[in-house]
Every structure is written in C-alpha cells, then in structure tokens.
Amino acid sequence: MNVIIREYLASLKERGELDVMIPDLLSQMGLEVFSKPGIGGRQYGVDVAAYGSIDDSSPKVYLFSIKGGDLDRKDWNSGSPQDLRPSLDEILDVYIPTHMPAEYRSKPVEICICFGGDLKETVRLNISQYEDKNTSDGITFSEWGGERLSRLIDDYLLREELLPDEFRSLFRKSLAFLDQPDIAYKNFSKLLKVIISDETKGKKDATTKVRQLHLCLWVIFAWSRKENNLESAYQAAELTLLNTWEICKPFLGKTNKLAVSVKSTFLHVQNLYMIINIEFMEKVVIPYANKRYALSNAIRSTCLVDINLKLFDILSRTAMCGIWLQWNKQMFKKLNLNLNLNIEIDKYTKVIKELINNNPMLLSPYKDEHSIDICITAWFLGVSSPNHEFIKQWFSALVQFCRFNFDIHGRYPCILKSYSELIEHPLAKTNEYREKVTAGSVLYPMIAAFSAVFGFDEVYKEIQDFQKESLRHCNFQLWYPDDSSESFFYTNKDIHGMTLHPIHINQKIEDFLDQVLNECHATSYFKDMSPNHHGMWPLILLGCRHYRLPVPMHFLESFIDDENSNNECTQ
C-alpha cells in the first residue's frame, strides 16, 4: 500500500492536487488548519498553515511550502518566483513577521518543505545549508517528502479500523485492473460500500469517510492518467460523488464548525469529479467530435451494439459536463464572482452538436433506456433558446429512424437489458417478438414532453402517428421519485420511484403537457430531495445517468418558469 500511495503522490501536480490533499491530512492528524490554498491574493510563500501537536510534541505552527513531484535543483532557485528558495525567503521575511494570526505569533514555527516525490541529491546540500543558516530558537525546518507523506496517509487517512487488509485488497484490485474498467469499477464499488457501510455516528466520522473516498479516487485518477486510460477514473468519480452525498447530506445546512468541515470535504470530492470529467472530455471526446465518424471508429469494435451504447454514453457525459458548468455559473453569480463560463458552456454545446452531426448512430437508439442520455442532452441544450431548432431537428430524426427501423424489423429501441440479448436483437422478425420487446417506453413520451414544452408541434404529431399506427400495445410511461427515493437514490441500494402510465399521446399537446405537469405538482417528493434543498440539483441528473433511471419530468418545469418570467417582463 505504501508503494501505491508514493506513486500516487509523485504524480500529483502542485496546484489543485497536492495542495488540496495536505489540509485534509493535517486535519485528520488533529491539527487546526487556519490557512488553505487560495486563488488571487498573495500567500507570501505559505500554501497551507496549521497549528497543533504531532506525535505528542509541543504545539507549534506548521507553515507548508508545497511543490509537486520530485524536488530538484531546477526547483530551488532558477529565477522563477515559484521556486522554493524565494518562497522560503518570503515566509521568513514577510509571512511570519506580518501575516501570522495574532494568537500564534508567540508560538514556535516549523517551516515544512513539502513535495510529493523525492529530494534529489543535486539540491540536498543547498537545502541543508539554508536550513542551518535560518534555524533559530523559534523557527525550525522539516522536510515532508513522498516517503513521509505516504506513511502519514497510511496512518491517518487509511487507518486499519477503516480500511483493514481485506478491504485494501479491493483497492489494489481496482488499481490492478484499470485497463479493464468493468472489473476495476466492480472492485471499487465494493470498496466504497465497505467504507460507508458502518453507521456514521457523527460529523467527524462523516468527514473521515469522505476523505477516505477522496484519497482513493485521487489514486485511481493518478494511476489512470499515468496509464492514459481515464475510463475507470470517470466511472469511479461518478459513483464516489453520489455516495459521498449520501454520507454528507445529514450534516448540511448547519453552521457549526464540524458541519462546515463536512461540506468542505464534499466540495473537494465534487471538484475532483470535475477535474476528472473535464480531463476525460479534453483528451477523449473534444479532439474528435468535429471529425466524421471519428468517435465511432475510436470505440474500436466491429459490433454495432458496442458503438451505439458507447456513443450515447459519451453524449450524456458531455452534456453532464456542460450542466455542471451551468451550475458553476449559477454559484458564481450568487457569490457575486465575475467569472465568465459562457465560453466553456458554448464549447460543450458545440461539441454535442458535432457529436450528433458526425455520428449518425446517435439518431438511432437501440435501447429505450437511451431516453436518459437523450433527455440529459436535450435539457442542457434547451437552457439556451437558440438551440431549440437543433433539438427539434434531432428529435424529428430520432422518431423517423425509430419508426423506420420498427417497420423493417431492424434495430429499433427495445426494453431489453442484457447485452447478449441486445446483440441478437431483433431475435425474430415477427409482430409477436416486436410487441414483446416494445411493451413499454419512456423514450417516446419523454420526447413528446420536451416537444410540448418547446412547441415542437410537428414532432409531437409524429409520435402521435407512430403510436396510433404501430405502438398501440406499448405502455407509454414516465418516472417520478417517491417517498423512498431520497433514501435510495444516491446509493442505488434498493428499488424506488413510481411511474405515471398510461401516458396519453392521443390528445391535444396542451392536454398532454397538463397531464405530465399535474403529476409533478401532485407530489413533493422531487422538490424535497436533498440536492434541491442545498443547491446541488445536478446530482439528480448525475444519479439518473449513472444508475440508469429515467429523468424526472420536474426538470421541464424550469423551462416553463423561464418562459413565464420572460412573458411577464414583456408585458
């Protein structure tokens, strides 16, 4: 385990990675962290500052100057302000005399030179001489390299009572099978369930468990990035974020110190999820989205089912990344932060359009379950009204292709779940088989619901005609959360939710929309879900994507509210 952690630490970057992990480690060691890495203002050489006692020593102030990877001669004093020596000079000359909090000014200080890798011989003498020259009665120095950090992480973030040997085996298996994402995910899922299975008795336990998950995910990501295979890290990131919310949600909404710590640790996990998400997009999706059939070919399968399943998966991943950027934009606006994310949001909008235009298989879903990916994508695009015409054309093509494949007994959307059954679909070109595998549908009423909200009358009529002529046997239905959804949604440990059926398409578009929205208004279960209460609503869409649950139609209400607001403004 120590070797695993050391390799992980050596791979971490200085900013946004190693400097994010150190405060969690220090907190777990019992120190009070009073300064963390920030964006903007001068830090005067100090990346992290903490106060307390380590190994029963006298309490002191610990000031960390953090560098990523190995510490070499080029990192010491090559002329860059980010070099180690200028940072140490600033700590001695500026931070300690002028920026130390008043309550710590009389305390002894230990300046910690922190790096994720090894201290190279080429710079060892320089550092030793510097330390000897500047050590005094009140100031000492220490080196926190990869070896020391890995031992501390093993002792404090992976303690035996939280991750005993049999569970560490699952962690090692997750890393060993990174090139086989399904196996790696299976082992990581078992590990995650083990970590969170014990009843969380207090906020400290919750914080510790989230830090455990955060560290495990970081290691998975670091190794995946090193192997240039991010698939396992992406799947683990979604699962970790959802299960972390389950741990943290009882402690949110409170203002005491420990509750703030729980929220802070969750945001670290959410930030790591976004780092993995964006890196996956930048390396795997975006470079190839604008090239005809490029992603279809990149899936490297001669099986059309493999290509179809993966393309729709990539489509909703891209949309989820855009949705989280929209969420960030909302959060920055609430905090009065002037950070413009419109360029990034527009980029992901363009990527989705290129994906659909350059990969025609995204016009022909093989599974009714692809309604989830289509719904998430349509919701992201639909936030900006200039995209509505594109959505309309996409929906129209989807319905036409589904109808054509249905008529010729081709690969029409079906309710089959098993991969082996999908490979053989359609197993028989008979009406009996066709009716059996299209006995129900969320896909068509979902498209109809979006069409009703956005005013796509022609698309709605196409679905009406399809249902009237070919799908009278099919039970059109939509999914809604129930009173047990909040308990099971984030871990998927049990079945939950309820369906509205039959959905009547053979009525006016206004009446159909009323039927869908009246059910939204009839229950409060969706609005009572914890992500809605705490402003983390993308978690619901993420949970639907990851656990393959239909998206609640409550998300359509936001478009109606926006339209009503616009109408009020123009009156």
Image (tube, rainbow, N blue to C red):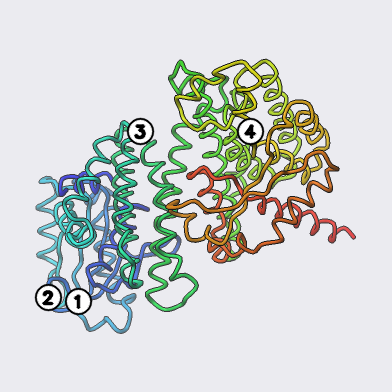
- The relative height of residue 255 versus residue 1 in the rendered view (above or below) is below
The residue mark sitting in front, 4 or 3, is: 4
Q: Position of residue 305 (x, y in %)?
A: 50, 23
Q: CA distance from mark 4 to mark 3?
A: 39 Å
| Label 3 residue SS | loop
Residue position marked by numbered label 3 in the rendering = 229
Q: Position of residue 135 (x, y in %)?
A: 12, 70
The residue mark sitting in front, 2 or 4, is: 4
Give neighbour class at mark 1: few <14, some 14-19, many 20+ (Cα, 10 Å).
Answer: many
Q: Quadrant of residue 468?
A: top right
The residue mark sitting in front, 1 or 2, is: 2
Residue position marked by numbered label 2 in the rendering = 57
User: Front-most of 161 and 437?
Assistant: 437
Give neighbour class at mark 2: few <14, some 14-19, many 20+ (Cα, 10 Å).
Answer: few
Q: CA distance from mark 1 to mark 2?
A: 9 Å
Q: Position of residue 275 (x, y in %)?
A: 42, 47
The residue mark sitting in front, 1 or 4, is: 4
Q: CA distance from mark 1 to mark 4?
A: 69 Å
Residue under the image location 51 percent in, 60 percent down: 486
Looking at the figure, which quarter contains the C terminus? Answer: bottom right
Residue position marked by numbered label 4 in the rendering = 439
Q: Is residue 110 left or right of residue 389?
A: left
User: Front-most of 237 and 112?
Assistant: 237
Q: Is residue 388 visible?
A: yes
